[in-house]
Image (cartoon, helix red, strand yellow):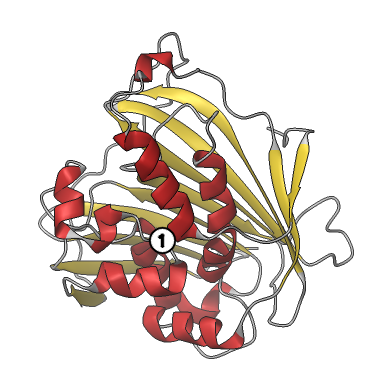
Amino acid sequence: MSAPSTVVHLDSLPRLGGLYAQALGRQAQAVIARSGRGRRLPGVTQEVGGVQVDPGHLTAYQHLLGERASDVLPAGYVHVVGFPLAVSIMARADFPLPLLGMVHISNRVTQARALRLGSGLTVRAWAQELRAHRSGTQVELVVEVDDGAAGSAVTPAWRGVSTYLARGIRIPDLPAAAETERDSGEFPVPTAVWHLGAGVGREYAKVSGDVNPIHTSALGAKALGFPRAIAHGMYTASRALAEVGPRRGEAYTWSVEFAAPVLLPGTVNLAIDADLDAGAPVFTYRGWGKKLNFTGTVEGE
């Protein structure tokens, strides 16, 4: 789908802490009849130009996720750059789903070319594809990030489509989302094992700005229906991308499906299978603990 033609230009990227506080205030106002929520998504594209990456922030991200030191922005880091604009769409008063408690269920990034430190970035975001899910209602948030290089008017350097689920929220008469195939549940020998402490959510929140309480607080997670805090989905997906490393090249498609939350503290086994025989490399990865947590691919161009 194309972006809504009505464009709202912002002076700067919004601060995530303020957006979550705003969302908390709205959800705390009794049950402002969820039945009164609309079934339409905001018909706007929000855009911010001239975004500059802070070198220290990039370095902190690289250290936490295991990315090598470079002026090339990892695809997971570009997601971090654009994430506040996506959240600002979900925090709007005319967005039909509650922001807090939203669960990230899948992500697909198409990176046509690498973005680099020092470039002035243009970030745009919009919502699309409101669908009925067996556990509630899902929606896609699209973010595009570009540096104005030749050809970007046709194909942005980076495009991410994140699918989120509002559990237990039902909106009548929505078309149904496509069902994903179930994994076999058979696990190979892991290529890496991650031991994640209780504070991983807070550590990733420092570099991503995503202070959603389901990730940063055991009490906050319990209030929103989880037994304890859960790892950010993009932390686990981005760490898997870092494990693939430079073999992915600078142009690739990266996808992830989240099967079950990673509870903190916890252990994740990771297996990466590389197919290097085709014209472009294809890496398939899976992460699991007691059960499957996520699967994904990195496909080179």
Label 1 is placed on what type of residue? Answer: Asp
Instruction: Single out the residue that lies furthest toward the right.
Output: 150
Quarter occupied by residue 158 = bottom right
- State the residue in front, 40 or 192: 40
Query: Could you tell me residue 111's position as x and y percent?
Result: 65, 61
| Percent of width and height locating residue 26 | 39, 36
Image position of 248 (left or right of 122): left
Which residue occupies 75% across, 56% down?
Answer: 156
Return the residue nearer the eye: 191 or 105: 105
Viewed as shown, does residue 121 lie left or right of 163? right
Query: Residue shown at 36%/71% (left/top)?
Result: 204
Is residue 66 something that shows in the picture? yes
Quadrant in which the C terminus appears: bottom right
Residue 79 in the figure: left or right of residue 124: left
**SS class, disc 1:** loop
Residue 264 to residue 259: above or below = below
Quadrant (top left/top right/bottom left/bottom right) for the N terminus: top right
Residue 5 to residue 142: above or below: above
How many numbered discs sit on the rendered protein?
Answer: 1
Q: Tell me, yes or no, if residue 241 can be seen here.
A: no
| In the foreground, 219 or 243 | 219
Q: Which residue lies at the image location 22% right of the left edge and 71% below the top edge? A: 190
Measured from the top left, where is residue 263 in percent x and y?
16, 58
Q: Is residue 48 left or right of residue 295?
A: right
Instruction: Indicate whether 125 appears above or below 76.
Output: above
Out of 28 and 212, give the one closest to the viewer.
Answer: 28
Q: Position of residue 41 (x, y in %)?
A: 57, 27
State which quadrant residue 157 falls in: bottom right
Farthest residue to the bottom: give it: 69
Residue bearing the label numbered 1: 210
Label 1, residues with CA under 10 Å away: few <14, some 14-19, many ≥20? many
